[in-house]
Image: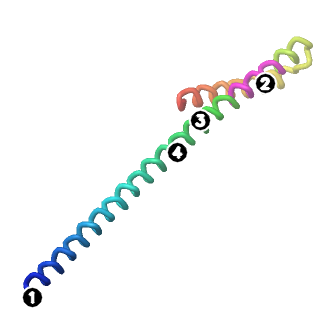
Amino acid sequence: MFSISLNAQDVKKEGKTIAETLKLKENVSSKEAKKLEKGKNKAEKAQKRDQDRLDSATKRLKSSQKKYDRLKRKGKLSPKQEAKWLKKLEGYQEDLKRAKRKV
């Protein structure tokens, strides 16, 4: 009789360790799922940021080009100012190229 109760305790212990093992596996899988979700969110944020940079670079270049053309057409630009505007527009075009590469 003593051996039966000992075996019952052993079974309870084994059941407990199996349950603990399953619980640990659930925790590990939930941690892995959280890591995957976190990585996914990080990638989505990066993609959104890159798209926002592309949109702002496009808008900035378009508005500056429009202003330059308007001033040039009216004859309001001195040669120094024209060189300055062309350099600025070239920089905006480079920004746009970089933003396109990122997206």
Q: Secondary structure at mark 2?
A: helix
Quadrant containing the C terminus is top right
Front position among marks 4 and 2:
4
Q: Which residue is mark 2?
A: 64
Question: Neighbour class for label 1 at 10 Å: few (<14), some, many (≥20)?
Answer: few
Q: Nearer the viewer, residue 37 or 22?
A: 22
In the picture of the structure, the residue carrying the numbered disc 1 is 2
Q: Earlier in the sequence, mark 1 or mark 4?
A: 1
Magenta stretch, residue numbers: 57-67
Residue located farthest toward the front when viewing the structure as drawn: 1
What's the amino acid at mark 1? Phe
Q: Nearer the viewer, mark 2 or mark 3?
A: 3
* Position in image of residue 101 (x %, y %): 53, 28
What amino acid does circle 3 point to? Asp
Find out whether the residues at labels 2 and 3 contact each other: C-beta distance under 8 Å. no
Dot 3 corresponds to which residue? 50
Disc 3 is placed on an element classified as helix
- Chain-order first, disc 4 or disc 3: 4
Nearest the eye: 89 or 82? 89
Residue that mark 4 sits on: 41
Q: Is residue 39 above or below residue 62?
A: below
Give the main secondary structure of the magenta stretch. Answer: helix
Lower sequence index among marks 4 and 2: 4
Q: Earlier in the sequence, mark 2 or mark 3?
A: 3
Q: CA distance from mark 1 to mark 4?
A: 58 Å
Query: Disc 4, disc 3: CB below 8 Å?
Result: no
